[in-house]
Image (cartoon, rainbow, N blue to C red):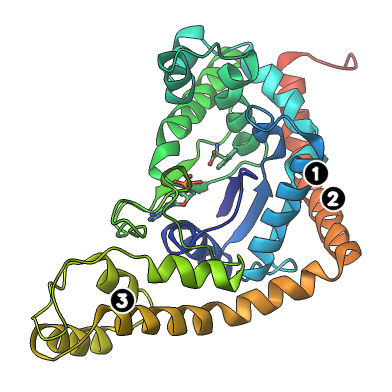
């Protein structure tokens, strides 16, 4: 079973990303062959600054390694180090109906905002299909927002296999973590970069503390029973086991307790929880050459897996040398 997932380099990781996605993605490396890549080609549809892309790309690599990606066991690579994906993207684009892409939400949203989308954004789902199909990926862990792109991928694999009469591509299964609770942001809405309500994972400690202290609460006083179903307790529960949660729930309902105290605890627990990951990330950060070596090795291994698949697609379509 081969697992593949890509992450766009688009800014600081927050604890919602970790509990809602990354933690589960990385758990898969325990018993699967995993490929994780940094989707720098994809980021070109939004980031138009080369230096910024270099930095953001490096940050994703550091985040993954910090969070426990094992580069021996799993393959970590930068998408643009595997240019085969662009060739496959072209091949797939020739069997992609325009209507299919016109229905994709990233493009539709942009149109709805009145912006004029470029061809890259329009073709984005085809590139994503190429990322996946190039490796005969069986399982693709993604967030809910990417579900449609996986349907497009399966559709394109089928269309290609049908058009050329060969089972060149494997149909991937989405692995969507719908069962997981959404992590609330400091204002109680879903934690998201676009709401500016995040608690960063590896950001400046002062900023993290400030965000936690700013979590919204109701107006219950010290002595009042507290509503358990509140953002502060949801965040606190991320760092507590079931028994501790039960105990805190009791205390919240019956004992004198200030929200400031709960926030203080969230802060302490969060710092302890992420400390080993932060240290590991910093260790990689201080060895940029080793980090590049890991990415180069990942690209080499990824290209070796991609070669026979691309070659099968070229053969089926009659591209390249005459046989
Ligand atoms: P953002 O909303 O901050 O832009 P992304 O869309 O980049 O986050 O999310 C990357 C991954 O993290 C997705 O798979 C998504 O499901 C997960 N994720 C993001 N925010 C949350 C959250 N608040 N709770 C749970 N999972 C989340
Ligand atoms: N489009 C995905 C996102 O924005 C990133 C991505 C690109 C991806 N290629 C992929 C995810 C292939 C999974 C598989 O989050």
**Mark 3, secondary structure of its residue:** helix
- Horizontal side, residue 82 vs residue 230: left or right: right
**Mark 2, secondary structure of its residue:** helix
Question: Mark 1 sits on what residue?
Answer: 303
Question: Within 8 Å of ligand 2, the CB of disc 1?
Answer: no
In depth, the one of 57 and 198 nearer the eye is 198
Image quarter in which the C terminus is found: top right
The answer to whether the residue labelled 1 contacts the one labelled 2, judged by CB atoms less than 8 Å apart, is: yes
Question: Mark 3 sits on what residue?
Answer: 237
The residue positioned 27% from the left and 65% from the top of the image is: 231
- Comparing marks 1 and 3, which lies closer to the viewer? 3
The residue positioned 65% from the left and 45% from the top of the image is: 9
Ligand 2's quadrant: top right
Give whichever of discs 1 and 3 has the lower sequence position.
3
For the residue carrying disc 3, how many other residues have a C-alpha within 10 Å: few (<14), some (14-19), or many (20+)?
A: some
Residue 15: percent from the left, percent from the top? 47, 63
Question: Mark 2 sits on what residue?
Answer: 300
For the residue carrying disc 1, how many other residues have a C-alpha within 10 Å: few (<14), some (14-19), or many (20+)?
A: many
């Amino acid at each position: 079973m081969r697992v593949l997932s890509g992450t766009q380099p688009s800014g600081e990781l927050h604890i919602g990303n970790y509990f809602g996605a990354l933690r589960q993605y990385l758990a898969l490396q325990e018993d699967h062959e995993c490929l994780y890549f940094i989707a720098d080609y994809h980021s070109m549809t939004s980031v138009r600054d080369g230096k910024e892309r270099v930095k953001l790309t490096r940050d994703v690599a550091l985040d993954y390694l910090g969070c426990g990606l094992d580069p021996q066991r799993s393959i970590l690579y930068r998408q643009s180090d595997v240019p085969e994906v662009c060739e496959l993207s072209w091949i797939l684009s020739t069997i992609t109906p325009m209507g299919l892409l016109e229905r994709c939400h990233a493009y539709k949203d942009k149109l709805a905002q009145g912006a004029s989308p470029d061809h890259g954004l329009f073709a984005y789902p085809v590139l994503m299909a190429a990322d996946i199909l190039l490796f005969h990926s069986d399982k693709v862990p993604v967030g809910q927002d990417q579900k449609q792109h996986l349907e497009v991928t399966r559709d394109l694999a089928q269309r290609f296999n049908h058009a050329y009469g060969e089972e060149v591509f494997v149909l991937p299964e989405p692995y969507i973590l719908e069962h997981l609770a959404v992590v609330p942001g400091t204002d109680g809405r879903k934690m998201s970069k676009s709401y500016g309500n995040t608690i960063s994972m590896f950001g400046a400690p002062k900023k993290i503390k400030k965000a936690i202290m700013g979590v919204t609460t109701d107006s219950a006083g010290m002595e009042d029973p507290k509503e358990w179903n509140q953002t502060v307790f949801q965040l606190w529960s991320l760092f507590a086991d079931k028994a501790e949660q039960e105990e805190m729930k009791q205390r919240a309902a019956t004992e004198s307790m200030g929200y400031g105290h709960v926030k203080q605890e969230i802060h302490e627990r969060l710092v302890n929880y992420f400390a080993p990951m932060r240290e590991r990330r910093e260790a990689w950060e201080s060895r940029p050459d080793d980090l590049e070596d890991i990415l180069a090795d990942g690209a080499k291994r990824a290209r070796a897996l991609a070669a026979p698949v691309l070659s099968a697609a070229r053969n089926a379509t009659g591209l390249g040398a005459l046989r």
